[in-house]
Amino acid sequence: METNGQLMVELIPELELIIGTQTPVQELSPTETQNRFLILFLNFVKVFATEDHPLVIFLDDLQWSDIPTLNLINRLVTAQEQGHLFLIGAYRDNAVDASHPLILTLEEIKKKREVGLLQLEPLSQDAVDQIIMDTLVCDHSRSELLSTTLYEKTGGNPFFYDRTTQRFT
């Protein structure tokens, strides 16, 4: 990162606390700037993704990703020299169709790498009941009415259950 550290600091401002103040980067054409960033980012990830310490990256809401971000993801996961990286992406399948840029990017990635898809289903009534029992620290006899009501109102959609704040939206 000797001459391009500032690019990473612009992406991850907290990095400056570790690597110190960086010198400004040389101005390049848009294409050269993009290529420089891609190479720098791939090298940056390689530092953390090693055989002894594989790297897992989770990206949420990919249905809202812009084209440059999707291109970066594509390049990151298809780079031959990029090993020991496991990328997990989440998106709402009801927000994309076959012509959506995310789906097109996934199709391109599938040509070079294995892509597994896991479609999440609604929670079962038993799972909702277990969440209620765990959250309220009670047994089934005390949770049953609430969990049944919540299950009926939400259809088991986990987005409606907020366990971290112990409330239901």
Image: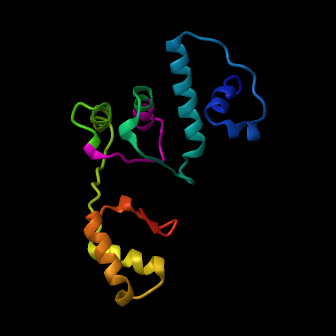
- Residue 75 inside the magenta-drawn segment: yes
Residue 76, x across and y down, in percent: 45, 35
Task: Please give left or right for residue 128 compared with residue 19 in the image.
Answer: left
Q: Position of residue 28 (x, y in %)?
A: 59, 11
Q: Position of residue 94 (x, y in %)?
A: 25, 45
How far across and down, in percent of the image, does residue 43 sit?
57, 33
Query: Based on the displayed image, in which of its 4 quarters is residue 91 positioned?
Result: top left
Specify whether residue 46 is painted magenta: no
- The residue most toward the top is 29
Colour scheme used in the picture?
Answer: rainbow
91 vs 2: above or below: below
Give the magenta part as a residue range.
72-94
**Residue located at (55% from left, 9% from top):** 29
Asked if 74 appears above or below 141 in the picture, the reply is above
Q: Nearer the viewer, residue 165 or 126?
A: 165
Relative placement, left or right, of 32 versus 102 is: right
Point 67% across, 14% down: residue:
26
